[in-house]
Amino acid sequence: MHKAAIIFKHSNRWKLSWLFVAIAILCLFFADLRINTYDPTAEFSRMLSGLLHPSLMSVSDPIDAFLQTVAFAILGVALGCISGFFLALLFRFKLLRICCALLRSVHELFWALIFLQIFGLHPITGLLALAIPYAATFAKVFAEIIEEGDHRAYNTIRNHTDFVSAFFYAQLPDLWNHFLTYTSYRLECGLRSSAVLGFVGLPTLGYYLNTAFLEGEYSEVWALLILFYILIASIRYWVRPKLLPIYLITAPFIISNDSLITFENIGRFFTHDIIPSPLRQNEPIVSLWHWFSELFINEALPGIFNTLVLSQLALVLTGVVALLWFPLISKLFFKGFGRASGNSFLIIMRSTPEYILAFILLILWGPSMLPAIIALTLHNAAIIAHLMGRYSNNLKLRQDASRGISLYLFEMLPRIYGQFLAFLFYRWEIIIRETAILGILGIATLGFYIDSAIADIRFDKAMVLIAITALLNVAVDILARYIRNRLRLKTTAECA
Amino acid sequence: MFNLKSASVNYEGKVILQDINLHINAGEILALVGHSGSGKSSLLKLLYDKQKLDSALIPQEYGLVQNLSVFHNVFMGQLGQNSVWYNLLNLIKPLSEPVSKVKNKLQQLQLEEKIFEPVAKLSGGQQQRTAIARALFHDGKILLADEPISSLDETQSQQVMSLLCHQFETIVFSLHDVDLALKYCDRIIGLDHGKIVINAPAKDLNRAELLKLYA
């Protein structure tokens, strides 16, 4: 170590960053980045002219669209939050942690596709699709918050009292605000998820957006999107502790409809639909192996490959764009109007679900990896840039620090790079999960094969593919955590 | 060089400095003495604001970038004099010319073996010497130094004081050590509750008089 300091060596963070860039460049050779549409500019100008005249005239019931979106989000997040809280208290059991990791790794939209088969359009479909992955995420984050809290008071009284009293007296009061902050952040995510669920048929915003998009009614698309931004930007005004009970009581009435759950459907799903077809037809066990290997080689492998290629490109591009964007909201680089407009730009980018961004870009450019990569980048880079900008505003610089680009390169970047990598690797798993989902739009990632299997009424195949997608997510999550630990990067729960 | 006339500083409703009258000529070496909270750091900040371009600064909390090497932190002293491309190049791969220049400064502070060590891995005293090297690397004629030797031992303190007094023409130190203040400075400014209570040549003062400020 004495000698080593005389020769300049790049840090591990530096080497790792370039390794990821190199892999992304390699991925470029395997990525389909063509623009397939005949005239993207004409479509784009039609979109823009829609923005100039937003209108709700031909949307059948815009108020109901928003009520449904909000009601599903509030109920789903509340259910997830409460069950997640109790799961968090039991998080020391390894089996529970593994279960939560698997539940978390399946995207809301896949859950919705599964439950649509079981419960049809009954509201419980949307509710469970939100509540299950959210509960697993809440459990993990709440457990982390408890873990990192101050245990001294708890340890002092634990011997004299039961676990529940000790927890409620000695831990919860200090952690309450952390729980609250995270829950309100998740409600914002819940609104986005709830809106997107409409794309697979639930009566939320996405349903109306889907229709408007497909009919080319861009004035409606913009009207709905603008209202959605206002809804998200005004969360802190309409989500009040005192109003929550009212919301929770009325929401079930809003989402209820007259579709019925039939036990015949549920039974058929578990005893027939998801049983691999060779087993269903009493074929020998060898044919089950053939069935699986064919599925694995022809659908899962190409799906995994495309998912990894696309997400690697999106991850690296997200990093680059986030590093360019975060000064937009940093007090050290912009002031007044500049910073305010930078801030609203980032808010719009991160409030638009990547699914909707990808949908828009897909209309412009046609099906290839390009729209998916750009959509994932815009959304995730805006989130990371927002978190980094806020982090950079808390940095204390010396009075004689340099300015402009030198300030960025020498003072900012080295100070926040560790935090930046931590955020980015935290988002990695999320980017993979979203990449798989974007397959539903026709890009050949895992979601594409899952969606096709469901369209062909081959749920046995779909379930295997969903399980493979979940395992891929868990694997990436483990790798990301290994890298974060190796580089000793610390994150806050907020970017989950 | 510096000329303050009944200057005051308020921060969050509290008076930090009041009615400061201070004239500093080029070539003078001053020491600010007084107990913690008497306004030494605030006075230094005020002075720095008056002469930003020519002054090198050693802030009390060093202002180092923990993840960068000692070389890069010292090199920051001259960022303003180079083109952006040159700075960027040196950030990615240190060039031999600035490395030898920085090494030269580090040798005077017995820190050359740590040149490519990240600052985060250094001890408190080594970090302080890095901040001193950054100021030495700055080509200004004025130095404003806030407790520059607080983490150094007796011998190192003496070395650093004479090194700094040798390189810079005009210096304002903030110091706790009244002996060093009397030894190296031409004039002593005593501060108490944000006011100047002593302003006299060092040769007219003695240890006992200055220690009263800390009573």
Image (tube, coloured by chain):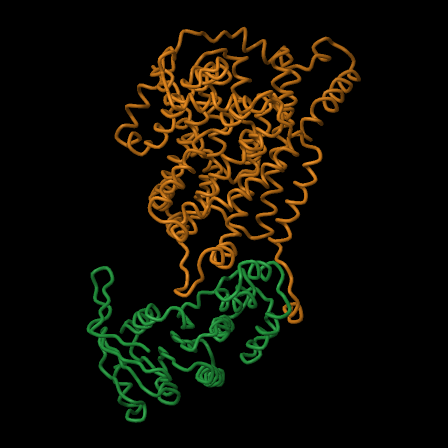
Chain colours: A orange, B green
Residue B128 appears in view: no
Residue A240 quadrant? top left
Residue B158 appears in view: yes
* Nearest to the observer: residue A400 or residue B85: B85
On screen, residue B134 above or below A465 = below
* Nearest to the observer: residue B170 or residue A171: B170
* Nearest to the observer: residue A358 or residue A169: A358
* Left or right of B76 in this view: A455: right
* Left or right of B135 in this view: A480: right
Numbered marks: total: 0
The quadrant of the picture occupied by the N terminus of chain A is bottom right
On screen, residue A127 above or below A428 = above
* Left or right of A350 in this view: A20: right
On the image, the x and y values in percent for residue A346 come to 43, 38
Task: Report the residue at 21% width, 67% height from top.
Answer: B15
On the image, the x and y values in percent for residue A448 come to 62, 21
On the image, the x and y values in percent for residue A377 come to 54, 36
Task: Report the residue at 61% width, 49% height from top.
Answer: A17
On screen, residue A368 above or below B116 = above
On the image, the x and y values in percent for residue A58 come to 38, 11
